[in-house]
Image (cartoon, helix red, strand yellow):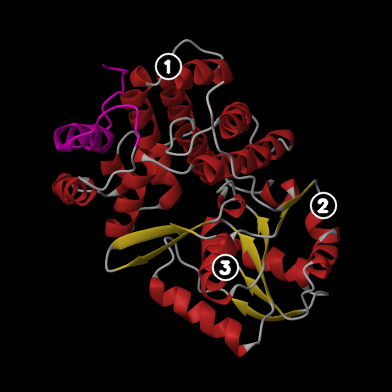
Amino acid sequence: MDRFTYDALPGRVVFGAGTSRTELAPELARLGAHRVLLVASGSAVSPARERTKDLPVVGEFTEVREHVPVAVAERARARAAEVRADALLAFGGGSSVGTAKAVALTTGLPILCVPTTYAGSEATPVWGMTEGGRKTTGRDERVLPRAIVYDPELTYGLPVRIASASGLNAMAHCVEAFWAPRANPVSTVLAEDGVRALAEGLSLIVDEPSAEAPRADLLYGAYLAGASLAGAGSGLHHAICHALGGAYDLPHALTHATVLPHVVAYTLPYAAEASRRMRRALDTDDPVGALRALATRLGIPAGLRELGLAEDQLDPIVERLAGHLPPGHPRPTDRDALRALLHDAWAGTTPKETV
């Protein structure tokens, strides 16, 4: 075996149906929390309030937005200071987690996460904020949540269209971990099992939207996705999606889900080990075709133009990314290759592995 380095990140995971009703109090006590700021938004606000009514929550922040605009981060930090919070409870999807991370980045406050989608962000020390049409990301262990309470019950009512995009977003984390700059044998094992769990769960919710077991599989896969990405880092796929999201405010999960088959098709011919693992995890000889077929069944847009992106908006992204791509991608990528990849993802061209 080749030499490798793997940073095992500290963090506690509590997983099981009903845990958001029984385990939040003891987990906050473990953190020594007495003045908690609840960070939640949208449909997560009501269950968050119901499950925290007897907890030491001294304030709320509900102005959460995708891609965490800097102005939103500043308001969340001000709210934490106003209520003299000593801990953060992020309840909801990736945007709620991201907002809590923005607060922790400057305050060092500990975060307890209760995910209600499959974002995976709760398992990483990665933060991201947007300003002036540019999304900036970084890695800082101050933003790594100290504990995660995964309660599948909170995802039972998640609409299939949202669950589908969120699940494929999580799968993008796993796939990228196969070839990201810090890829290693440990993160690769997590990524492969994550692909398997997510694919199985997504396949089942199409035909059985109300089934509970697949929702637990998806939540488990989301944790593996975040953990694998935390260990391996991110690469070309995330660079593309972050640039698109920051510049044009495209929906985060749907952008990842739409771009994923194209980046996989572009990369797999140059990544033999990743190809072998994806074939095994998806139980197919054609992982690109299987991903595209799954995305189609789930109703994911074939191309970015269905998300409202105009063709003339592609070149600014190419120029923004050229020369600033993450190192070590298996396939050498210049401006022309990047432009072709983006155009295919925009047009919805059927992705095929090509050398």
- Nearest the viewer among 260 and 107 is 107
Residue 18 circle label: 2
Dot 2 crowding, Cα within 10 Å, few <14, some 14–19, many 20+: some
Task: Please name which of the two marks, 2 or 1, marks the residue nearer to the observer.
Answer: 1
Dot 3 crowding, Cα within 10 Å, few <14, some 14–19, many 20+: many
**Label 3, on which residue?**
100
Give above or below for 108 relative to 273.
below
Dot 1 crowding, Cα within 10 Å, few <14, some 14–19, many 20+: few
Point out residue 96 in the picture as x, y percentages from the top left corner: 56, 63
Q: Is residue 297 left or right of residue 22?
A: left
Element type where label 1 sits in the image:
helix
Q: Tell me where residue 125 sits by quadrant.
A: bottom right
Residue at 54% across / 73% down in the picture? 103
Q: What's under tag 3, amino acid-wise? A: Ala
**Label 1, on which residue?**
272
Q: Is residue 306 visible?
A: yes
Q: Give the mark nearer the N terminus: 3 vs 2.
A: 2
Range of residues picked out in magenta: 328-355
Distance Cα–Cα, label 3 vs label 2: 23 Å
Question: CB of mark 1 within 8 Å of CB of mark 3?
Answer: no
Element type where label 3 sits in the image:
helix
> As drawn, which residue projects farthest toward the top?
285
Q: What's under tag 1, amino acid-wise? A: Ala
Tell whether position 198 is magenta: no
Point out residue 209 in the picture as x, y percentages from the top left corner: 63, 36
Q: Tell me where residue 318 sits by quadrant.
A: top left
Residue at 68% across / 53% down in the picture? 10
Distance Cα–Cα, label 2 vs label 1: 41 Å
- Nearest the viewer among 256 and 137 is 137
Q: Is residue 150 visible?
A: no
Task: Please name which of the two marks, 3 or 2, marks the residue nearer to the observer.
Answer: 3
Q: Give the mark nearer the N terminus: 2 vs 1.
A: 2
